[in-house]
Amino acid sequence: MTPEIMEPYHPEADRENFPGFSFRRPPKEGPAVLGEIEYPILRCMIDENWHVHNTCYLDMVREILPAETDPESFTELEAAYRKEVKPENGSVIVTYGKEEENTVVRILDKEDRSLHAEFVLR
C-alpha cells in the first residue's frame, strides 16, 4: 500500500505485521522456464466471488513442481496475486523456474500469457 492510501488510516508502527520486510515485485518476465503445464479451471475451484479460490492456486504450485521436490523443504512462501482467474479462462499455464536460491511458480493467462499470480518458494 502506498503512503497516500495509508494516510487516512494512521497506521500504528508498533503493530506492523512484517517489520523491515520488503515484498518482491514480480518482474514482467519470470526466470527461465524449467517446466510448464496447462492447468484446467474446474467448477469446484470457483469461490463466491466467481474467481478461483486462493487455496486452489497452491494446488497448481504443487502440481508443477517436480515429483522429487519435497514441499516441506520450503520454509517461506510469498504469493503475489495480480489478476483473478475466472471460470471463463478455461485453463491457465503454470510454469516454474529458479531464481537464485528460490523456486518461482507463475500462473499465466493461456491466451496472452499475462501474469495472474506468482509464488516464490524459499
Image (spheres, grey):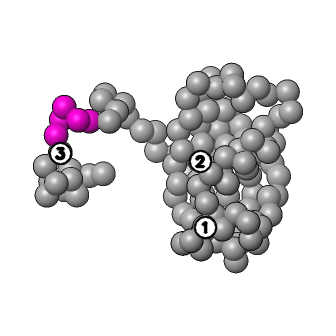
Residue flagged by tag 1: what amino acid is it? Asp
Specify whether residue 1 is in view: yes
Disc 1, SS: loop
Badge nearest the viewer, 2 or 1: 1
Residue located 54% across and 63% down the image: 83
**Is 42 left, or right, of 30 in this rendering?**
right
Q: Disc 1 or 3, which lies upstream in sequence?
A: 3
Give the residue number, with chain letter if any, for mark 3.
11
In this view, 109 is above or below 66 = below
Residue flagged by tag 3: what amino acid is it? Pro
Percent of width and height locating residue 34: 79, 38
**Is 108 left, or right, of 120 in this rendering?**
right
Give the residue number, with chain letter if any, for mark 2.
118
Q: Residues within 10 Å of mark 2 (few under 14, many from 20)?
A: many
Quadrant hosting residue 122? top right
Badge nearest the viewer, 1 or 3: 1
Residue flagged by tag 2: what amino acid is it? Glu
Q: Is residue 59 magenta?
A: no
Give the residue number, with chain letter if any, for mark 1.
47
Residue located 16% across and 40% down the image: 12
**Is 41 left, or right, of 53 in this rendering?**
right
Disc 3, SS: loop
Task: Determine whether label 1 and label 3 are within 8 Å by CB.
Answer: no
CA distance separating discs 2 and 1: 20 Å
Percent of width and height locating residue 38: 82, 58
| Chain part drawn in magenta | 12-16
Residue located 58% across and 24% down the image: 75
Q: Disc 2 or 3, which lies upstream in sequence?
A: 3
Q: Nearer the viewer, residue 53 or 81?
A: 53
**Is 79 left, or right, of 73 in this rendering?**
left
Residue located 73% across and 66% down the image: 44
Disc 2, SS: strand
